[in-house]
Amino acid sequence: MTSSLTSSAGSVSDASTSSPVSSLTLTATPADALIDVPRHLVVRGATPGAHVTLTARTARAGGVVWHAHATFVADADGTVDVSRDAPVSGSYQGVSAMGLVWSQVPEDGKSRDVFPQPVIAPLVTTVVAQEGDASRHSSVSFTQRLAAEGVTRRDVREDGLVGTLYLPPGDGPHPAVMILNGSGGGINEPRAALYASHGYAAFALGYFKGPGLPDYISNTPLEYFKKGMDWFRRTVRPAHDFVALSGQSRGGELVLLLGATFPDAVSAVIGYVPSALIHSAQNACDPAIGREGPTWLLDGKPLPHIWENNRTASWAPFDEGPPPHRHAKAMLTALDDADAVERARIPVEKIQGPVMLLSAEDDGSWPSSRYSRMVTERLAAHAHPHAVEHLDFDRAGHAIVFPFVPTTQLVYAHPVSGKISTGGGEPDANAIADERSWAAVQAFLAQAVAERAHSQGQS
């Protein structure tokens, strides 16, 4: 899907349609493509030196409209190129081809859900260009998709598993990625759909706060995830028997833990803003058990966590600190008890594959930069024989997703506890982290698959 749309004075036409030189025209290229493809927005026919304002509007989950605007100065040829020019005012600063998307805010002032429902539905953004008093204007729309043409979706409700399977077009076999969400629970379909769009069999496995699942993360058995990996392998028979794990936040903690616990079943690990330690149930806890209760069980027994018998840990910096509250401040108090840290440390040296870590220096939820360094240092100390990559993003916060989505809603109510906090970061830095992390993950996976194939004597 690489088409382009052009419009003149509010009308939409194919890119090949000619328009009078004097008319204001706005083009978006490509007009219809995956969500991670940047768009080239260009205004032509403006008065040289005139102020041209671009306004972008996208109807997202629940029908809530998100919007952003930016004003540019047309060059000597009467052109504004959003990938070349910085706005003189508006929702973002600096040159950013997709600034009119990542800087969007919801009109209701509170929504955070940015992906379409259902996930396979398109997201359509309409951009209007206006010169001066808007007597000269043009509009164009472009479509972002999470699922490429030919990607299939299937609900999974078998073997006690709850999730969604996305498969790329074609018979395969395809390398596979299992995706695990964090403390918000649910099923991470957007990431699974995008993985499938890039050629991976993708299984988004829910483990709480989903249909037929517990409401809380407390006392989650690790054997459930091993069952999920076994089902995934039997079902898709992945190329080179390659099954990677990708997890976000508590899911990032979880994928490292699963790689260490079931090393023969895990081909590679991708941890977004992960932890080096096992944590208590925290904000996703069953209130009857409490936030200092266990999260993970193995063989029916709770795994030791950082808050357990910790001599320095305190919730006060989070609970009593100034708004917006930062959960990371409480997490840092727990790291002052070296014995508790060692008891709770994930034995990442047992992982038998490459590891990728993506962290944020201004992570408001927990210190993912420090945690990721703890992981890389431990792997180095044990001479980990596989690739280890760590990208740490300056000024970015906890919500590293993928391009190109709004990054502005930094303060939110936790979906389980309801506590108000901030994930940290700045919108522009979060947008950079989204874009660069996804490119790096794709390269990491491609290399991991190639090395797996080579080790098996396959091409």
Image (cartoon, rainbow, N blue to C red):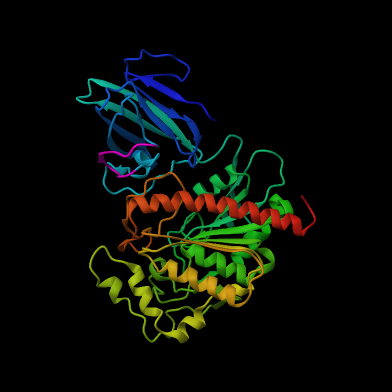
Is residue 192 in the magenta section? no
Q: Position of residue 72 (x, y in %)?
A: 28, 34
Residue at (54% x, 40% y) in the render: 147
Up/down of 231 relative to 132, above or below: below
Q: Which residues are magenta?
A: 84-94
Residue 83 % position (x, y): 40, 37
For the N terminus, give its image quadrant: top right
Residue 420, quarter of picture = bottom left
Q: Foreground residue, 230 or 376? A: 376
The answer, for residue 394, to whether it is visible in the render is yes
Residue 458 relative to residue 301: left or right: right
**Image side of residue 119 versus residue 323, left or right:** right
Residue 397 in percent (x, y) is at 38, 59
Which residue is drawn at the image coordinates 62% and 72% (left, top)? 261
Query: Does residue 232 appear anywhere in the picture?
Result: no
Relative image position of residue 63 (x, y in whole percent)? 35, 38
Q: Nearer the viewer, residue 452 or 234?
A: 452
Which residue is found at the position 44% from the left and 24% from the top? 5
